[in-house]
């Protein structure tokens, strides 16, 4: 690591030693910045790294709400407004019991570079709560969302901060959040993205993260003279992102052989078809957070309890669930089974040992901040439509999404090309994302 980056990282380790996820995400970015920092002394002179690891604003608040038995429950809400050098803060809201300040800061830090990579005008933020939606009723979700917005509304706005969904926050939650925002502010505007298509949402936004990931994957494959058709793909997760990736991969003739949940994974040797992909939505809607029923519904497929899909021999692995879901042993399994390409779709889905394992074995690996950037990109397209009081047809949104993913891939290749011609997508994404943010910070002064 470059000496300046090392010093700032060590100071951060002393300051917040307990923020493991945040430190992990910072270290991974800083590892990539050696040459850029050496060649640009103005970054150190302007204390760019010190400022970059310090969120511009952290909002933490109490969310009291009434459960179905009319009892009061209390959760913690967050919005980490990390960096606004490139535009209004932008990034999703996560409702999950694992949410804490470290997770929020890592996600907002990653988001800053991801949003920069898209080249669209968006700063980086993330928010959410340790609220657990599993097993809750629709009434409880509404109560929770409305209470959450009763504090959040004063910190956001269409040109201030525009939240969206993430794990545990989909169109239903965005609807309740938007309804409360509108009521509190007396304004109908593009303050949230991922809205319903009938009331300000963009076509293709639900599919966008998964579709974008597959478009990016296609570019990775084409540099290796490979085609997606007929390839065996292991996906993890079964939520919105895994669904979109499965749908596009199946449409393009790939053989998707796994999905997974907290209970285990499904091995479907026949490969998924469009009916099976559609069933993922039913699984999700059940609110039980399990994939086991898939095996009962589709004979020939198997449910493997308590395990992860990375033990299955595949050509392509796409982690689509959550951070640190794929560890060093999982990576070694994939390498032993001759995986060819790993496209990380979840935010920081692979542990550092796993990334090192792929890179040492010469397996092409691309990081989530590049691969999953289609989601937030399409959120920005939703903001454009809202600001212009218009709606674009799905072909137009999809075409723009495709173009954005092509450009992100090109930026990774340009900034990550090694002497031997191989592409280090981690370095490429970090360098391309970093430079735009850093230059804007220097230009704007302190
Ligand atoms: O991780 C992400 O990029 C998201 N959850 C989507 C963020 C957004 O603003 O659409």
Image: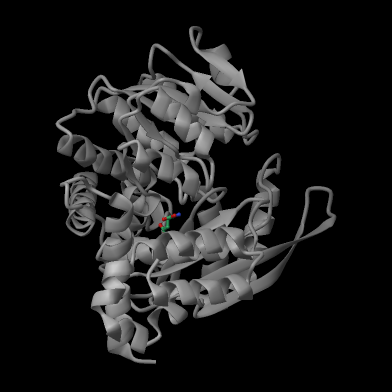
Residue 217 placement: quadrant: top left
Q: Residue 138 appears at what percent x and percent y?
A: 65, 45
Residue 124 versus residue 199: which sits nearer the camera? 124
Q: Position of residue 12 (x, y in %)?
A: 56, 73
* Percent of width and height locating residue 388: 25, 68
Q: Please state, as top left, top right, bottom left or bottom right, where the C terminus lies in the image.
A: bottom left
The quadrant the N terminus occupies is bottom left
The residue sitting at 48% across, 76% down in the picture is 8
Compare residues 278 and 386 and report the one nearer the observer: 278
Instruction: Farthest residue to the bottom: give it.
Output: 446
Q: Is residue 59 left or right of residue 207?
A: right
Query: Where residue 386 appears, x then y in whole percent?
Result: 32, 65
Q: Is residue 138 left or right of residue 212?
A: right
The correct choice, above or below, for 380 with respect to 140 in the image is below
Left or right side of 298 for 393: left
Taking the spot 36% from the left edge, 46% from the top edge, the residue there is: 209
Q: Quadrant of ligand 1?
A: bottom left
Q: Quadrant of residue 422?
A: top left
The residue drawn where x is 63% and y is 71% is: 16
Task: Tell me if residue 387 can be seen.
Answer: no
**Above/below status of 433 relative to 83:** above
């Amino acid at each position: 690591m470059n000496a300046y980056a090392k010093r700032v990282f060590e100071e951060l380790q002393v300051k917040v030693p307990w923020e493991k996820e945040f430190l992990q995400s910072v270290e991974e970015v800083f590892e990539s910045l050696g040459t850029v920092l050496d060649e640009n002394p103005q970054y150190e002179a302007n204390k760019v790294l010190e400022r970059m690891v310090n969120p511009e604003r952290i909002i933490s608040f109490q969310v009291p709400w009434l459960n179905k038995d009319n009892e009061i429950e209390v959760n913690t809400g967050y919005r980490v407004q990390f960096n606004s050098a490139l535009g209004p803060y932008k990034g999703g809201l996560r409702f999950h019991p694992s949410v804490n300040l470290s997770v929020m800061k890592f996600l907002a830090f990653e988001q800053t570079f991801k949003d920069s990579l898209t080249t669209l005008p968006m700063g980086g933020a993330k928010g959410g709560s340790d609220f657990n939606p599993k097993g809750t009723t629709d009434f409880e979700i509404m109560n929770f969302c409305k209470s959450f917005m009763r504090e959040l509304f004063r910190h956001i706005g269409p040109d201030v901060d525009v939240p969206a969904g993430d794990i545990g926050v989909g169109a239903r939650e965005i609807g309740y959040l938007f309804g409360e925002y509108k009521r509190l502010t007396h304004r109908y505007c593009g303050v949230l993205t991922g809205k319903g298509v009938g009331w300000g949402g963009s076509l293709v936004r639900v599919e966008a993260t998964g579709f974008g990931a597959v478009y990016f994957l296609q570019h990775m494959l084409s540099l290796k003279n490979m085609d997606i058709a007929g390839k065996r793909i292991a996906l993890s997760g079964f939520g919105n992102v895994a669904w979109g990736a499965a749908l596009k991969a199946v449409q393009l003739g790939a053989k998707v052989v796994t999905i997974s949940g907290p209970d285990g994974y499904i091995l479907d040797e026949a490969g998924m078809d469009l009916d099976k992909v559609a069933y993922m939505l039913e699984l999700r809607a059940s609110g039980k957070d399990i994939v086991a029923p898939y095996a009962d519904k589709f004979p020939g497929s198997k449910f493997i309890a308590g395990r992860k899909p990375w033990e299955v021999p595949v050509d392509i692995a796409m982690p689509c669930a959550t951070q640190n879901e794929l560890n060093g042993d999982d990576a070694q399994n994939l390498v032993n089974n001759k995986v060819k390409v790993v496209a990380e779709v979840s935010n920081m889905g692979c542990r550092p040992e796993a990334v090192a394992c792929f890179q040492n074995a010469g397996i092409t690996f691309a990081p989530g901040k590049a691969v999953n950037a289609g989601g937030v990109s399409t959120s920005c397209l939703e903001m454009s439509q809202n600001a212009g009081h218009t709606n674009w047809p799905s072909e137009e949104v999809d075409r723009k999404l495709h173009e954005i993913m092509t450009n992100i891939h090109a930026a990774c290749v340009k900034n990550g090309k090694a002497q031997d011609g191989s592409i280090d997508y981690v370095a490429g994404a970090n360098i391309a994302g970093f430079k735009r943010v850093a230059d804007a910070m220097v230009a704007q002064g302190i």
